[in-house]
Image (cartoon, rainbow, N blue to C red):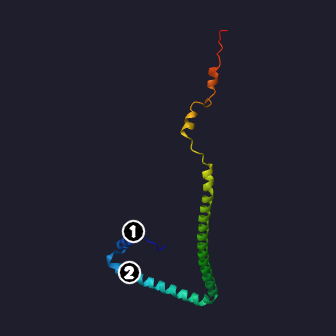
Amino acid sequence: MGNFTFSEIFTIIIVILIVFGPNRLPELARKAGTLAARARSAMDSLKSELDAEYGEALAPLREARNELRSAGADLKGQMSAIEKEVASAGNELKGAAESAVEPVKQALQPAEPSDDAATDDVGGGTPSNGDDAADSAPEESADG
């Protein structure tokens, strides 16, 4: 409530202008201003009466609220410091792991084959399917 957009305010002004006319508009604005001032004065009066009546009872609660807010701010600061430390330790651990794994990676990489070894194996492998064995067997004739 109280969050009016420009178009809503403009629409309200147009409706008021149409309903009451331009001659009564200044009188209505004066009355609305007077009512708003009275409402603000009544709220201030009520607030000061409540504060005078319950101020002593609310003082410990306000103090506790302020302590909790400061404790929350301290915790946020500590959490931020811990996050930075964890990130730093993680980066250090990652670097150590990478440096430890690098020699193992190099040891596991196969040596590059020479050109002679690559050409020697051409056509000397096993058949890709079992059809070659069936083709080399003698065929029996169905005649008899």
Apparent side of residue 75 relative to residue 4 in the rendered image (left or right):
right
Q: Residue at 59% of width from left, 67% of height from top?
A: 87
User: Which one is nearer the viewer's eye here, 116 or 91?
Assistant: 116
Say which residue label 1 marks. Answer: 7
Q: Label 2 amino acid?
A: Ala
Image coordinates for residue 50, horizontal then vertical, percent = 58, 87
Say which residue label 2 marks. Answer: 29
In the rendered image, which quarter contains the C terminus?
top right
Q: Say if mark 1 contacts mark 2, CB within 8 Å.
A: no
Label 1 or label 2, whichever comes before in sequence order: 1
Which residue is most to the left?
A: 23
Vertical order, 27 against 122 (above or below):
below
Image coordinates for residue 49, horizontal then vertical, percent = 56, 89
User: Which one is nearer the viewer's eye here, 82 or 115?
Assistant: 115
User: Which one is nearer the viewer's eye here, 121 or 46?
Assistant: 121
Vertical order, 119 against 100 (above or below):
above
Image coordinates for residue 79, horizontal then vertical, percent = 61, 73
Distance from disc 1 to disc 2, alpha carbons, whole Å, reads 20 Å
Q: Residue at 58% of width from left, 70% of height from top?
A: 84
For discs 1 and 2, the disc positioned in front in the rendered view: 1
Q: Quadrant of residue 117?
A: top right
Image coordinates for residue 121, horizontal then vertical, percent = 58, 34
Vertical order, 12 against 138 (above or below):
below
Q: Residue at 62% of width from left, 56% of height from top?
A: 101
